[in-house]
Image (cartoon, helix red, strand yellow):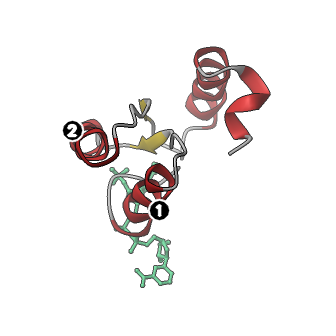
Amino acid sequence: MTGASSGIGAQLAKEIAKAGGKPILIARSADKLGELCKTIYRDYQIDCPVYPLDLKSEAAVQSTAEVIFEDNGGDQCFDQ
Ligand SMILES: NC(=O)c1ccc[n+]([C@@H]2O[C@H](COP(=O)([O-])OP(=O)(O)OC[C@H]3O[C@@H](n4cnc5c(N)ncnc54)[C@H](OP(=O)(O)O)[C@@H]3O)[C@@H](O)[C@H]2O)c1
C-alpha cells in the first residue's frame, strides 16, 4: 500500500487488515508507518511489513521492490 502513512492509504491499509490481509506499508515517513503498524497489530493482530521509500526515486523503488519480493514470498505477495 503506497501512501500508507496518512489519509486514504492509511485507511485502506486498515481495511485490508480488517479483511484478514497483510498490507505492506510504504511511504516516506517511517515514524508514521511504524505507528500505523502498531495500530493495525493492536486492532487486527496483523503484523504489517514496513518499507520507508520515496517513490520519486526510481532506483529506490527498484531496490525496495526486490527486497519486498524476497521478504514476502515473491509473486504471492500481490495475491491478496
Ligand atoms: N482525500 C480526498 O478526498 C481525495 C479525493 C480525490 C483524490 N485524492 C488524491 O488521492 C491521493 C491521496 O490523498 P490523501 O488525502 O490520502 O493524501 P495524504 O493524506 O496527503 O496522503 C498522501 C500519502 O502519499 C505519501 N507520499 C507522498 N509523496 C510520496 C513520495 N514521494 N514517496 C512515497 N510516498 C509519498 C504520503 O506519505 P509520506 O509523506 O510519509 O511519504 C502519504 O502517505 C492524493 O493524490 C490526492 O490528491 C484525494
Nearer to us in this view, 1 or 22? 22
- Residue 17, percent from left and from top: 45, 49
Quadrant housing residue 62: top right
Q: Classify 11 as above or below 26.
A: below
**Few, some or many C-alpha atoms within 10 Å of disc 1 (few <14, some 14-19, many ≥20)?**
some
Q: Mark 2 belongs to which amino acid?
A: Asp
Q: What residue is shown at x 32% (from left), y 60% (from top)?
A: 6
Quadrant housing residue 69: top right
Ligand 1 image position (quadrant): bottom left
**Few, some or many C-alpha atoms within 10 Å of disc 2 (few <14, some 14-19, many ≥20)?**
few
Is 78 situated left or right of 29 in this image?
A: right
- Residue 33, percent from left and from top: 30, 42
Q: Classify 52 as above or below 3.
A: above
Residue that mark 2 sits on: 31
**Residue contact at pointers 1 and 2, CB within 8 angstroms:** no
- Residue 71, percent from left and from top: 58, 16
Q: What residue is shown at x 33% (from left), y 52% (from top)?
A: 5
| Residue depth check, mark 1 versus mark 2: number of the one nearer the observer | 1
Task: Assign the C terminus to one quadrant of the image.
Answer: top right
Element at badge 2? helix
Element at badge 1? helix
Residue that mark 1 sits on: 12
Nearer to us in this view, 54 or 14? 14
Mark 1 and mark 2: Cα distance apart in space: 18 Å
Count of all numbered marks drawn on residues in the image: 2
Q: Which of marks 1 and 2 is nearer the N terminus?
A: 1
Q: What residue is shown at x 29% (from left), y 38% (from top)?
A: 41
